[in-house]
Image (cartoon, rainbow, N blue to C red):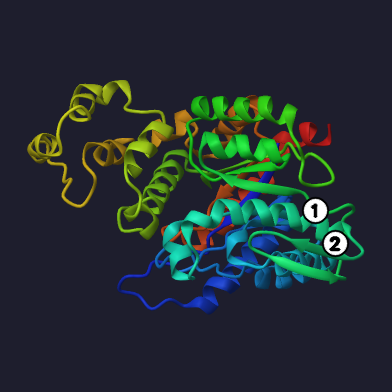
Amino acid sequence: MKFGLLFEMQRPYEGTDIDWNALYRETLDQCELADQVGFDNLWFVEHHFLFGFSGSPCPEVMFGALSQRTKNIRIGFGVSVLPNHHPIRVAERVAMVDQLTNGRVEFGTGRSNAYEQVGQGIDPRETRERWEEAIEMIPQIWQSEEFSWEGKFWNVPARRVLPKPFQKPHPRMYLACTQTESFRLAAQKGIGVLSSASYAVDILKEHVKVYRDAIKDADPVGAEINDYWANNVHSFCSKDDQAAKELCAESMKTFFGPDKPYIQGRINAYEELLESWGGVPDNLKADFGRWLRQSDDEHKTQAAEAGISLDSGPGAARAAVAELDANILSDRGVIIAGNPESCINTIKTYEDVGVDQVMLIMQTETIPHDQVMESIELYGKEVIPAFADAKVA
């Protein structure tokens, strides 16, 4: 098992002035510590306009700093949003960071969402085709002495694109995936998965199987097939087992709060979350199982009688998500949290279903910098060493 940290670079927005300088300096400190204590990867998102969620519009700027402040840890675009950029510019940026890091770059790709796309003048209906054209172009750019292209969205006359990556033939490529169709697409293209949804391990197991089966018939866009599966998951480790689980559960639920732009724009967002987190547990089925089959008016009335407010959310599914307590989420593997022993036990369940790396989300708007640093350090001292033999093998 490999260990990564995934950064959205979060700060709460409403009612506060964001200290961007402190945020970026804290992030660099966390990354430097992760390198020192034995983490394998750092991953940074590309997001735009997502107030109260992400301050990471141009991760390659952070990578320039990290190339000089870290020595061993691999640095990942998690992801580069291909429809936003000309493929030539993406290839140049990734190759330059790869040179600065002496070949430590991982190249994740994705399409983002309509909220961000429309804000940049990009037609959401075109993003699948734009991504497919770009993912074909970029590895060819890296491997060609002289590159030219005639496509639907981009035309490039013969040019020498510089620099080339440090890694040969090129950095490993990935697709950010949230659903079965995306897992199959990644397999078809012969690229790795950055699973960017939260799953109970029992449900995750089926998605991994779909990908592993499909990649056997890959037609790779790059020079080699990359069959690597990295899975993001909220995590927090401390000596106080229950307190760590509670803090991590709060962090994840805030992450998926109804005030977030990407939740507000999604139909059935909480129904999807509830399903991916393992559904309504047995001890709540008597209440929520009935509500999920009723109309909004019916279950709002019953929720009010039970003291649960559904006024600002999509109904029973949101209430059920709110009622999934920290221990349920931990037992299902939706979060990796608790003391080192609890974290180790949960990570082993990820390993058992075929996940190659856990991409841990520790830095959020609800977990302060000093506690993130403590969690990173405890991972390095007690959690990562528990998997040392397997990593050597």
Q: How far, Cα to Cα, is label 2 from label 1?
A: 7 Å
Query: For numbered disc 1, what is the local secondary structure?
Result: loop
Q: Residues within 10 Å of mark 2 (few under 14, many from 20)?
A: many
Residue pictured at 48% horizontal, 40% vertical = 198
Tell whether label 1 touches label 2 (CB within 8 Å). yes
Quick one: label 2 or label 1, which is nearer the N terminus? 2
Residue kind at label 2, given as amino acid type: Pro
Q: Hey, which quadrant is residue 383 in on the image?
A: top right
215 on left or right of 260: right
Query: For numbered disc 2, what is the local secondary structure?
Result: loop
**Disc number at residue 113?**
none
Q: Is residue 340 visible?
A: no
Residue 99 versus residue 326: which sits nearer the camera? 99
Residue pictured at 74% horizontal, 27% vertical = 216
326 on left or right of 113: left
Q: Can you give x and y, in whole percent of width and height, for residue 354 in the image?
A: 66, 28
Residue pictured at 38% horizontal, 37% vertical = 272
Q: Can you give x and y, in whole percent of width and height, for residue 288 in the image?
A: 22, 29
Q: Quadrant of the C terminus?
A: top right
- Reading the image, the residue beneath label 1 is 171
Q: Is residue 171 visible?
A: yes
145 on left or right of 118: right
Residue kind at label 1, given as amino acid type: Pro
Q: Can you give x and y, in whole percent of width and height, for residue 290 in the image?
A: 18, 24
Q: Can you give x and y, in whole percent of width and height, for residue 369 in the image?
A: 52, 63
Q: Residues within 10 Å of mark 1 (few under 14, many from 20)?
A: many
- Reading the image, the residue beneath label 2 is 165
Residue pictured at 32% horizontal, 70% vertical = 14
Residue 349 versus residue 108: which sits nearer the camera? 108
Q: Hey, which quadrant is residue 321 in on the image?
A: top left
